[in-house]
Amino acid sequence: MFKGYLNAFFDLFFPKNCHICSRLLGGLTARFDDHLCQDCFSAMKRCHVVSCRYCGAALTQDREIEELLCRGCRNDQPDYQRLLACYAYDGPVRLLIHRFKYDGRPYLARTIAALMTRVLPAGWLEQFDVLVPVPLHPSRRREREFNQAALIASTLARDPGLPVIPALKRTKNTRALAGVKRSERRNVLDNAFCLDTRYKPLIARNRVLLVDDIVTTTATVRRASRLLSREASCRKVCVLSFAKG
Ligand SMILES: [Zn+2]
Ligand SMILES: [Zn+2]
């Protein structure tokens, strides 16, 4: 009750807007949190439940559904055990990522982590020992002033009390892979990452969750998880992403 009055007081003097539709939050507008209205949240599309365990693609064939595996991934299995993507990269999800990354609003990591927690099964994060963010090239990090994956990872890690280890480094500033042919993606990503050996003792033989804001082709997370499982000898690697492009 008191909290309700307190919120009303703050809304009066410090009005907040939904970062997606700009609507004023407070009064009659139901909100997801201080940055997002309930309508924009409701318009976010969750990823298919029946999807490929490695790339998140929707499945239609009986055999694929039975194995939770698409044809492409059956022939090209990654070094991670499973990929979990939370929402389709579309509509309000696309806008939220845009505001977060390109409009310099790092505090939206809290909203994004809360949205992800809604989708994850209870206690799901506790099966891991550490979280590792997908790295950003230093020059891009300077431009943006933060690594979006690292911010999401550290916000997610807070509640279960897990460490976030920046065990991977980006050594090549690669272009976006969405428009690049599958056969060329490997060349683009060749030596794009390396393991920061200082952190190896902290992740070796551990169960690692690799975290990114958006997964499109899976080429990046495949490359990153190869280093984690083969070079860093992690016991188990899974991938968690806010959006699936
Ligand atoms: Zn809204
Ligand atoms: Zn697949």
Image (spheres, rainbow, N blue to C red):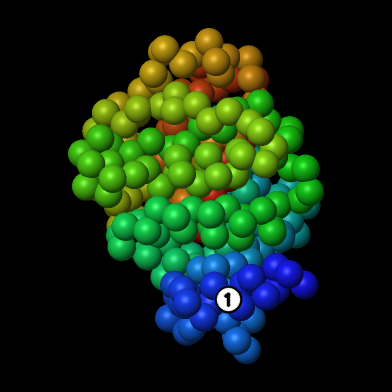
**Residue 214 horizontal side relative to residue 50, left or right:** left
Q: Quadrant of residue 186?
A: top left
Residue 171 pos. (x, y %): 27, 28
Front residue of 132 and 164? 164
Furthest residue toward bottom: 28
Ligand 1 has an atom within 8 Å of the beta carbon of the residue at disc 1: no
Q: Quadrant of residue 39?
A: bottom right
Looking at the picture, how far across and down is residue 80, in whole percent?
Answer: 59, 33
- Residue 6 x %, y %: 64, 70
Secondary structure beneath label 1: helix
Tally the marks.
1
Residue at 28% x, 37% y is 137
Q: Is residue 229 visible?
A: yes
Q: Residue 7 occupies which quadrant of the picture?
A: bottom right
| Coordinates of residue 54 in the picture (x, y in percent) | 59, 44
Q: Where 112 falls versus 218 (above or below)?
A: below
Viewed as shown, does residue 88 lie left or right of 121?
Answer: left
For mark 1, what is the residue? 9
- At x 67%, y 75%, the residue is 5
Give the amino acid type for the residue marked by disc 1 in the picture: Phe
Q: Is residue 129 depicted above or below 101 in this figure?
A: above
